[in-house]
Image (tube, rainbow, N blue to C red):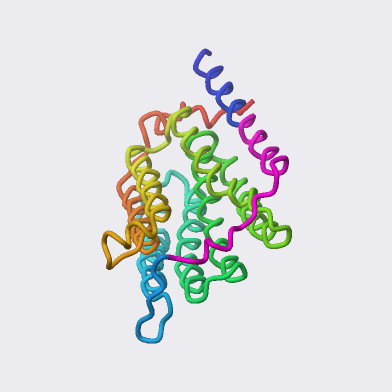
């Protein structure tokens, strides 16, 4: 009884924080896109490609995205791919790796000639990755069917946040999609029991992505130190490592004893 009460209390807490986040992005003063963002430290061209390293460093993202899709769709003797209790659970990861693949193209397109209009095509596929991971975490930590049902609405909300920025100039909804979703994912990892093992791998993914964002913030400083690579180029490479680590986790994880026993709290009525 106490365990079920604690689970439901955590669900209400997560729901409350989601509502607070939604309210905040529309109450806060508008956040505008700084045009200095497009002035990356490394603007060297090579073989006719402007901003060469920032463009071609997206190839690893493209490749690891395709690797993830291949893993999810490859035929196995089992009905479900390895790492999933039910086949419906894989769709969040299909959207994730599809988003990573498109990000490889979109980011390369943006870095070829950086501008607000090109940045739209970089950010759109990124919202697929953030929202699909949020849906996957809900599936695996709170309620399996709820997470699957929320996948499409969450993805649509993520896409809408980019168009909202394009139409109004306000970045807050997109910033919420990227950063607040990561906060909610980390919160759910802390509050709710997992359906699958290898949670440490998921924490590594979050940590590696945080390292990628740190490299992005130190764009010029890293170029001044390393000379060969800028911080933004390094961000692309590190982000590809984070995606590969997630793929590695999926290929190796197995259901927890709690999930296998059928007593996982997420199988029960939520509220």
Q: Is residue 181 left or right of residue 47?
A: right
Give percent across and percent down for residue 90.
47, 52
The answer to whether residue 186 shows anywhere in this view is yes
> Which residue of the protein is positioned furthest toward the top in this rendering?
2
Q: Residue at x 54, y 49 (%)?
A: 178
- Up-down: is 26 above or below 127? above
Front one among 53 and 99: 53
Give percent across and percent down for residue 49.
41, 82
| Main SS of residues in magenta | helix
Q: Residue at x 56, y 56 (%)?
A: 127
Residue bounds of the magenta highlight: 15-40
Q: Residue at x 59, y 58 (%)?
A: 34
Front one among 247 and 233: 233
Which quadrant of the view contains residue 189?
top left
> Which residue of the protein is positioned furthest toward the bottom in this rendering?
48
Which quadrant of the view contains residue 135?
top right
Give percent across and percent down for residue 94.
48, 58
Front one among 72 and 104: 104
Quadrant (top left/top right/bottom left/bottom right) for the C terminus? top right
- Up-down: is 105 above or below 13? below
Q: Does the stretch in magenta take in 34? A: yes
Q: Residue at x 30, y 47 (%)?
A: 252
Q: Does the stretch in magenta take in 213? A: no
- Up-down: is 209 above or below 189? below
Give percent across and percent down for residue 153.
65, 50
The answer to whether residue 75 shows anywhere in this view is no
How many numbered dots are placed on residues in this image?
0
């Amino acid at each position: 009884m106490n365990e079920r009460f604690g689970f439901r209390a955590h669900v209400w807490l997560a729901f409350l924080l989601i509502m607070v986040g939604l309210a905040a992005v529309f109450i806060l003063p508008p956040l505008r896109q700084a045009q200095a963002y497009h002035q990356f430290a490394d603007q060297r061209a090579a073989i006719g490609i402007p901003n060469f390293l920032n463009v071609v460093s997206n190839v690893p993202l493209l490749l690891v995205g395709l690797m993830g899709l291949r893993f999810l769709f490859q035929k196995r003797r089992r009905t479900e791919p390895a790492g999933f209790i039910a086949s419906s659970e894989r769709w969040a990861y299909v959207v994730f790796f599809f988003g990573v693949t498109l990000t490889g193209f979109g980011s390369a397109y943006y870095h070829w000639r950086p501008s607000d209009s090109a940045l739209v095509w970089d950010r759109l596929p990124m919202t697929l990755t953030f929202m699909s991971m949020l849906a996957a975490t809900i599936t695996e930590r709170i309620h399996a069917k709820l997470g699957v049902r929320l996948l499409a609405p969450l993805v649509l909300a993520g896409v809408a946040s980019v168009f909202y920025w394009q139409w109004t100039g306000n970045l807050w909804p997109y910033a919420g999609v990227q950063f607040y979703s990561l906060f909610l994912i980390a919160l759910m990892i802390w509050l709710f029991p997992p359906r699958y093992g290898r949670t440490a791998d998921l924490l590594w993914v979050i940590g590696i992505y945080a390292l990628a964002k740190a490299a992005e913030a130190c764009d010029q400083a890293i170029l001044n130190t390393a000379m060969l690579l800028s911080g933004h180029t390094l961000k692309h490479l590190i982000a590809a490592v984070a995606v590969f680590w997630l793929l590695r986790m999926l290929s190796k994880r197995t259901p927890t004893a709690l999930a296998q026993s059928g007593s996982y709290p997420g199988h029960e009525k939520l509220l």
